[in-house]
Image (tube, coloured by chain):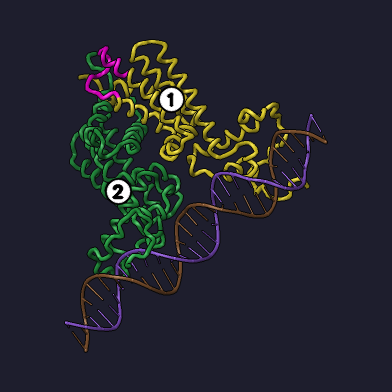
Chain colours: A green, B yellow, C purple, D brown
Amino acid sequence: MTTTSANSGRARPRAAGEGGARRRGKGSPALASERREHLVRLAADLFAEKGFQATTVRNIADEAGILSGSLYHHFDSKESIVDEILTGFFDEIMAAYRAEIDAGRDPRETIAGLVRTAFASLEPHRAAITVMQNDWNYLQGMDRFGYLTKSEDEVEKMWVETIAAGQEQGLFREDLDPHLTYRMIRDTIWVAVRWFKPGGRLDSRSLGEHYIKVMFDGINTHQR
Amino acid sequence: MTTTSANSGRARPRAAGEGGARRRGKGSPALASERREHLVRLAADLFAEKGFQATTVRNIADEAGILSGSLYHHFDSKESIVDEILTGFFDEIMAAYRAEIDAGRDPRETIAGLVRTAFASLEPHRAAITVMQNDWNYLQGMDRFGYLTKSEDEVEKMWVETIAAGQEQGLFREDLDPHLTYRMIRDTIWVAVRWFKPGGRLDSRSLGEHYIKVMFDGINTHQR
DNA sequence: CGTGCGCGCCCAACCGCTTGCTCAGTTCGC
DNA sequence: GCGAACTGAGCAAGCGGTTGGGCGCGCACG
């Protein structure tokens, strides 16, 4: 009997060997390791469903078919798991946003590009987006996650400047508060994570296109 | 000395007598009582800030200047508090929605009316709206809150039918999915609860009017 | 070819703390 | 002296996190 008991049903004990992890010099705070990445993905799925605070380390361990204590062989805290998820999200989306802006097209196309970028991240980054909505206030109170506010400010700046530029060029209505408009757009996109299910009848692409149509031209018919 | 210790700073012990509580025959599960209503309002404020799960019964008790156990003289569980808040919200908004629809005006005016109704509830029902966004998944998993899904479906039906009617009459664009459009509108309104502060520089009325403009005609300038 | 051992992985038990909730008993205005 | 309001202590359950040790695989060494 290799595996005596434990493993109450649920998950296959994972074959143990698997592949890897050569070095991992003690200095760097843990490099990759496939097993580790796998655990992060499992945790992400749970965060995407329930948020960060509502997910326990025992939930994560159960999903992986191990005990909660075993998680601490890979991570030094529950926070460091979500940190990894959030950092990955911000790195990726901010790079994508910047690329969209640096393309230097007119504000209308740029905004459309930003919206498409945001919707594109809905699927791969469900966990991060859910956490940001459910646990934003909680995380903000911790020094470790101070970078969240910084990144958010930077993102807001990009959107607001683009909107303002569009107004100056006469592309967007003058009677809109750029900040307010940004928030409306942002929230409406991210909140979709609550009901958007990856395998459903509509993908995030067409969702984005639908949203762009309504946002730009409204729901009225436009013979006027 | 009446109050020995406890009451660690924070709140005035509330004068105790106050008014209170005639009947409340044992049969009915607790009728009003001003004290009780006051406690519900305090709890609602906390729910509006942090959500349901993240608020503890001790938080609520602290805010009222009493001990957590004392809450159970008024309520039989934390859930029954939020239940009261949610039920009040749904009862009110669904009645208002129905009145708007029964007025029988054309779809464009009806939709505008629904939007105004929703924005009007933003201020008095902040707690319920916050809870529905933060704890929807959690609450849905409990038999007690099964009515949430039912009510939501009913609401969705009202909106979708109105949108579809507007399309048939040529008022709204044909190339919009009514369900998707409803969700977009709904999300955009409710999500405002996250940054909307009652005493702020713009009230919920002008916010609603602003949104109606954008929703109908989009953010584009409309010389086309 | 065999063997020992380092190491990645995990278990089992536990810590200190917080959670929602209970309940016998005290307080006090009517 | 009755009853609504509240106390004070405490419960079981669950939380994030810690610890010491055991297992088995692959590789270096003889």
Residue B164, by quadrant, is top left
Q: Are marks 2 and 1 on the same chain?
A: no
| Label 2 close to label 1 by CB (< 8 Å) | no
Say left or right for B27 vs C1.
Answer: right
Q: Which residue is mark 2?
A: A89
- Residue A100 coordinates in the image, percent (x, y): 21, 41
Q: Which residues are magenta?
A: B162-178
Q: CA distance from mark 2 to mark 1?
A: 32 Å
Identify the amino acid type marked 1: Phe
Q: Is label 1 in a helix, a strand or a loop?
A: helix
The residue positioned 45% from the left and 26% from the top of the image is B204
Residue located at (28% from left, 56% from top): A38
Residue pointed to by mark 1: B119
The quadrant in which residue B152 appears is top left
Residue type at the position of mark 2: Phe
The chain under label 1 reads B
Asked whether residue B111 appears in the rendered view, the answer is: yes
Mark 2 residue element: helix
